[in-house]
Each structure stands twice: as structure tokens, then as C-alpha cells.
Image: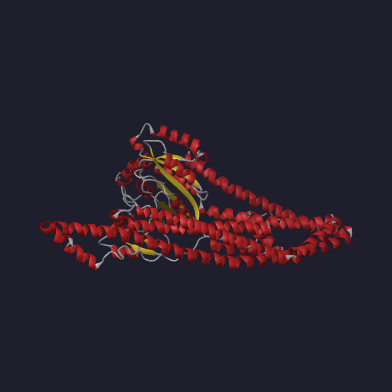
Amino acid sequence: MTRPATAEQKKRVDPVVAAGAILKRFGKDREAEQIAEVASRIPPSRTVVVVGEVKRGKSSLVNALIGVPGLAKVDTDIATSAEVRYVPTSADRVRGSASLLLPGGRRHEVPLGEVVEWVTIDGKAADAEATVREIDAMVPIGAEVVVDAAHLPRTTIVDTPGVNGFDPRHMEAAVTATNGACALVMVCDALAPINSAELEFLQSVTAEIGTVILAVTKTDKALTSWRSIVDDNRRLLAENAPQFAGIPIVGVSNLFALKAMRSQDDARTPSLWKSSGIPELASAIDDALGDPLMVVRRNALQCAMVALAGLQAELETSRQAIVDAPRVHREMTEEKARLEELQAAQKEWSTRLGQRLTRLQLASDNRGKVLVGDFKQRWEKRFDKLGVVGLSRHSQRIVGEMSIEVEALCNQIVTELRSELNDLAIDMMGEAFLKSESIAEALSGLEAVDLRPPREYERWKGFLDPQLVSMAMAGGGLSALAGPFAVALIPVWGVVIVGFRATKFGKQNLTRWLNDTLRQAQEDTSSAIRTVLNEFGPELRLTYAETLAESLAESRRLLKESAEQARADEAKRSQSLGVLDTELNRASNILKALAADRALTGTALTQRARAQNS
């Protein structure tokens, strides 16, 4: 008598684990290990990027999402080069700690209270007298503050405010720095519909941004009309940026949020938060980012489905070899001849590969020269427009902006080349390339360029000339001519000299820094490209040879198998078919379970989003 199944026996087997087990049973250890590695990966980070024009309430909104009033300084011009990242605590990140982000991946710890002074236009980075030596050694391109956001736990919030408009390059930098789900919150005004600059920015948002959410601030100033502004925004989005027509649009009041943060009345605080709209916005962001664990699970399911589908195809081929042995024998004979022909022509294939790689490298070099030339020309025109005051106050900020843009420029060059190399490999190798981890690893060197830190910017180099200073103080030849007016002319003459030299050498030093930084960045980029090409070409040739050898061995195996089956009796063929059918049925059931889990992953997120929005 069969005993009833226990609760443990009835427990459903994880289809990812089952897929790994059946793959190992058929000798596909590498595929099984890859599935296990993907399934055990650390969940990706959750990042939300907040953008908007000045006076829209961006920093106040960041404070409200974090739940700490005054953390992000309000009503301050943040340098366009500086992003401020508010990251959650972890084993190596202590709450309240802060760091400046410097070019070349360097960091410098600073007191939390000083962060805003380094990333604002009128802060330490603009103080030309008191801190010139200090900031010449540190040109911050951003800052990082460790804090747990009350409304968005385990989430990094990036404040990338622009001065008088948007800079799409900040979005590129923020996305590049994010290893995982990323959502964009655009902050607009409840007093007027979305404007053309905001629409233009939305249209330029790259495909890496998973979701865009519109936060309409200052609803407390338009209590009865802000919803009509939301309707206008939806219409304008549908007309000008239809891909964002259905995005969440949430009305928020930073004023009510501030009152909630400062409230001492526990009974009234929840209603203040509700009136602020911040919990609703946080819920929309949370839905957009999803559960990081689900991202890992989804990737593991996909990896298992691809590997198991490959095994299923091989089993189907083996089954067909038994069912229709004479025809399969004929086809395998033809396939074997084709593969042997390709194997014999490997030298010709290798020559064509070398020619195409050379052409790609030359095209990439020329494209890089054009991009660098345009970049340099654009910045030199900007230098020409700067006067002595602009050079004195904003040169450090300009250096920071250039640092970010140089890195983005180099990444653009290598990213385009990486895409072209990827297309070349697929064209010359087909599916074999998609299965090659070694080639993908070789190409990973072009995911981002590891640039050396630029040299320190010397703002005042060449400015002071003792001889001219003496002339200025003595009034030069003018004292003899001016007679009694010499005393009045001396300071005027000195100011003229100082102003002229400050402008001249300020522009020269910026230009020199730009040229040196571009030259160094080009060297690093060229070095990275050479390193990748030196690995990519041989890896492609090796993978091609291995793939041909494996395919040829498989065709010979199937050829032998079909020949044996053609000679086998009916009973033996029937037995072999039974074994294969059992394995195929098992593989099919696991594939169905994987597909069901993958569908459930997406459905679960959708259901959660609907429940939170209801």
C-alpha cells in the first residue's frame, strides 16, 4: 500500500534548481553553474534620480522623501557639474557620513555640514582667496551623503539640479553609476503646465531609464487648480512625448511635508503627510523600481529557460534521429561536410576578421578625433566669454563640469565601438557568439574607461609677475606724466594690469588644463581599446575554432547514432524513444514552471502597484 505524500514531499521544487539538476545529468555543468551564479547574485541597487529646473522645489522634495528637513540645502544654486547622492546605510557606510566625489573615482571625506559648501556655486568651490590651495587639490564633481530615506528605504536618491535648465549628460552619468533599477522623477510646478525645456529634456531621456514620474510641486498654492494642470501636462506629453503619455503624475506639497517633519502632534502628523502627497509619490517610485530580489529572480529564470531550451532542442534532435534515422543520417552527412569545409577555410575567415577589426578601429579613431575636436572647440568658445569675475568665481566649477564631460565623451567612444564589435561578432559567428562568455568578458573592457585622475588645476599659475607688480605699484611711466594725479592713477593702473593678466592667464590655464586632460583621456581610451582588441580578436578566433570543432563532433555523434538506429531493431528503438520521451517531458514541465514563475514575477509587481495606488 502506497503511503500518502508528506507535506515535505508535496513541497514544490524550485524550477531553477530542477533546471540545474537536469542540465548536470546531461553533462552540461557549465550551464548549470551559470544558472546558480546568476541566482545567487547580490540584488541590484535601487536608485531614483530627481531633476528639474530652478525654483521648482527639487531639494525640498528630496528632503521630504528622506524625511530630514534641511538636509539638501534649499534655494541654493548647485553647480551644474555636481550631483548629490543620498545613499542608504550599509556595513561600510555609516549614517551621517559624507564624501566628496572627485575625478578619477577618488573620494574625500568631509563633515556633513560642509557638503553643500563644496557643491554650490557660492560655496567653498568659489572662494578664490581663503581656500584656493585646498580646492586646487580637490575639484569635486559631486557628493555622497549616507542616510536612510524614511519613505524610500534601501534606495539611493540622486539630486542632479541644473542651473537655468537641464543637462542630459547628468542623467547619463547617473545611469552609468547605477547598477540596477533606475527611475527618474521630474519636478514641475503646479502653477503652470510643463514647459518646452522640460518636454525637450524628456524627449532626450535615454532608454536606460526604466520609468519616469512627474512630481507636480506647490499644490498648496493651487489647491483647486493643480489637477487641471495635471490634465494639461498629460495632454502636452501625449502630443510632444507620447512614450511618456501614461506616466504617473503625482501632486505634492513640500510645505505640508515640512510641517509633517516638524510636527510634534502624533495625531496630526499622518494627515499632514497624506496632504503632502509624499507617501503617494514614494509609492509610485517604489512600484517603478520594483523589488531588487525580483530582478535577480527574473534573471535566473531567464538564464535557466535559455539553457534548458538548448538541452530540449538537443533531445528533440536525438529523438528525431531515432524516428527517422535514414533521413537524419543523410542530413548529418551533409552538415558534417559543410562544417569540415568551414574548418578548412578558417585561415580565410581569420583574414577577413582581421580586416574588419582594423577598419572598425580606424573608424573609431576618426570618430573620436571629431568628437574631441568639437568638444574642445565648444569649451574654448565658452572660455572666451568669461571675464575676470567669471574666471575667478567659476573656474573650479567649470573644471568639474569638464571632468564629467570628458569621462562621458570617452565612454561614448568606447560604447559605440563595443556595439560595433558586438555586431561584427554576431555577423561572423551567429549564435556561437551569444553563448561565449570569454568574448563577452573581453568586450567588458569597453563598458567604461578607467581614466587616470586629471592633474590639479592651477588657477593662478603665471598670474603674478614681480616686475609688473612693481610697475603697477610705482605707476610705471605714468607717474612722471600725471604729476599731482599720479597717486590717483597708480591704483587704476594696477587694477588694469591685474584684470588683464587675470583674464589672460585664467583662460590660458583653463585651456592648458583642458588640453592636458583631453590628451591624457585619449591615451587612456586608446590604451583600453588596444587592450580589448588584443584580446577580442584572438578570443573570437579561438571561439570560432572551438565552436566548429564542437559542432563537428556533435554532427559525427548524431551521424553515428542515426547509423546505429537505422540498423537497430524495432524493440531497441522503442526503448530509446521511451527514455528520450521521459526526459523531454521532464524538461518541458520544468520549462513551463519557469515560464509560470517569470510571468508571476511581473504580475506580482503589477498587482502590488495597483494595490498601492488604490
Extreme residue in the left direction: 484
Q: Is residue 384 left or right of residue 581?
A: left
Split into 4 quadrants, where in the image is the N terminus? bottom right
Q: Residue at x 54, y 59 (%)?
A: 366
Q: Is residue 192 left or right of residue 350?
A: left
Q: Relative to 4, is 535 above or below? A: below
Q: Is residue 44 left or right of residue 92?
A: right
- Residue 184, image x, y percentages: 46, 47
How is colour applied across the structure in the image? secondary structure
Looking at the picture, tell me which residue is in the foreground, 144 or 571. Answer: 144
Q: Is residue 552 left or right of residue 399?
A: right
Extreme residue in the front direction: 481
- Residue 67, image x, y percentages: 36, 49
Report if residue 234 is visible in the image: yes
Report if residue 123 is visible in the image: no
- Residue 95, image x, y percentages: 37, 59
Looking at the picture, tell me which residue is in the foreground, 187 or 459. Answer: 459
Label tally: 0
Which picture quadrant has residue 466?
bottom left
- Residue 89, image x, y percentages: 41, 58
Looking at the picture, tell me which residue is in the foreground, 165 or 505. Answer: 505
Looking at the picture, tell me which residue is in the foreground, 268 or 105. Answer: 105
Q: Residue at x 17, y 58 (%)?
A: 491
